[in-house]
Amino acid sequence: MAINKILLYFAPSKRINMTEFTQIAWPIFERAIINYHLLDDVDQPFNNPYTEGTIEADLYRKCWIDTVQWHFEDIIRDPDIDPAEALVLKRRIDKSNQDRTDLVETIDSYFYTKFHDVTPLPDATINTESPAWAVDRLSILSLKIYHMKEQAERKDADEAHLEACRKKLAVLLEQKADLSTAIDQLLEDIAAGRKWMKVYKQMKMYNDPSTNPVLYGKK
């Protein structure tokens, strides 16, 4: 896809309908993935095409982080990688994971603000995960679909590989439809008071120098 077409692919930001949230999010994820692969370099600069402070900007950044980390994971599995380089890359993956988790919480704050005035019904239930963690899975799914499609169209692969990847791609596309429906239904249920909008903050102990014994033991 040419750069000029990428830039024209999306309509300007508008008020997001919560019952169609994934229809807004998915094209943003696709845009982040396509833009990353223009250079296909984990060290390329990050340029967010969306206005800072908007949910669109957060969604784009979320998928960008996921995309870079996807390629980190490819690189670190090189059996010939230098151990010193692998350690540096492992540290970058750790930071990327933390950035990803922080951004999920930011996106959940967006949803929490949206639904802050909703009074849950007496029989309201709690979902197994917050809306943003479901969106996190959708972002990663968009990467799986992009790369599986790439594998299903490889010119240097045999037919057995192509057919296997086509079958996997079909399953991923079905998963996309199911997950998108589930996310939109969850948001609709929260808006109607049928589900609680409840968020638990991260408690990653190994990143905290006060709870990781290896870190606080060095003091």
Image: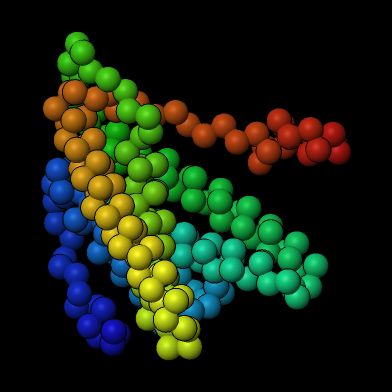
Q: Residue furthest right?
A: 218
Q: Residue furthest front?
A: 160
Q: Answer left or right for 130 relative to 83.
A: left
Q: Residue 21 location, x and y as percent?
A: 20, 49
Q: Nearer the viewer, residue 52 or 37?
A: 37
Q: Residue at 18% of width from left, 19% of height from top? A: 119
Above or below for 110 versus 161: above
Above or below for 149 versus 124: below
Q: Answer left or right for 218 relative to 71.
A: right
Q: Residue 47 location, x and y as percent?
A: 40, 71
Q: Is residue 1 visible?
A: yes
Q: Residue 93 location, x and y as percent?
A: 62, 58
Q: Residue 153 location, x and y as percent?
A: 37, 81
Q: Nearer the viewer, residue 55 or 186?
A: 186
Residue 193 is drawn in which quadrant? top left
Q: Quadrant of the N terminus?
A: bottom left
